[in-house]
Image: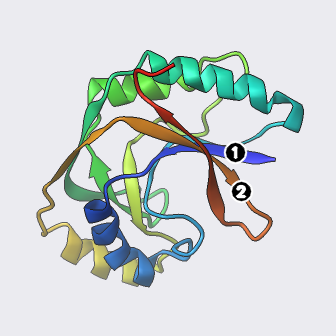
Amino acid sequence: MKYGIAIFPSKKIQDEANSFRKRYDPHYALIPPHVTLKEPFELEEDQINDLIQELKEIAKHTSPFKLEIKKVSSFSPVTNTIYLKVEPVPELMKLNERLHSGNVLPQEQTYSFVPHITIAQKLSHDEYSDVFGSLKMQEFNFEQTVDRFQLMYQLENGAWTVHETFTFGQE
């Protein structure tokens, strides 16, 4: 089965992201706005309990931290993806590191970790230029405290759903 690990921001941040996603993100219906901590990975059913124990241990040793968004950015020229840029605070970067150094968790990463919430992807070059041009002039000022992450799994229709939530500082 395919799994992933994410942080879901507050409703206020999700509403702002969705105001763009419903127009510019073909994955809008498959998963709510989120910060991907660990890209999708395959795991055998008999490994899930070991994975959950590993994630509980990681969460137990993680303190709540601030999630801050101040602007949009882009992965251009690699892809025409536009995102809300999440400030790379040390606690978030350390959490990502821990999620790539376990015994059950796959350690490989396709890309360097750039904390973000996707708001537009798979745009034509012209559409990308128009949308990014107008969004980069806007100010965004969101801040919240994050105290949990979610283990997700992918359904047959491609949608993602929460398997389990892990709260920081708890057994």
Q: Is residue 76 visible?
A: no
Q: Which mark is residue 154?
A: 2
* Foreground pick, 13 / 96: 13
Residue 24 image position (x, y, % from top left): 43, 79
Rendered residue at 13%/69% (across/down): 138
Q: Which residue is mark 1?
A: 3
Q: Earlier in the sequence, mark 1 or mark 2?
A: 1
Q: In the displayed structure, would residue 83 be above or below residue 63? A: below
Residue 168 image position (x, y, % from top left): 41, 27
* Foreground pick, 93 / 10: 10
Q: Which mark is residue 28?
A: none
Q: Quick one: label 2, few (<14), some, or many (20+) residues within 10 Å?
A: some
Q: Are marks 1 and 2 in contact (CB under 8 Å)?
A: yes
Q: Amino acid at mark 1?
A: Tyr
Rendered residue at 75%/48% (across/down): 2
Dot 2: element: strand
Q: Is residue 60 visible?
A: yes
Rendered residue at 22%/72% (across/down): 135
Q: Amino acid at mark 2?
A: Gln
Residue at the far front in the pictured view: 171
- Does residue 79 appear left or right of residue 153 in this picture? left
- Whole-angstrom CA distance, mark 1 to mark 2, is 6 Å
Color theme of the render: rainbow
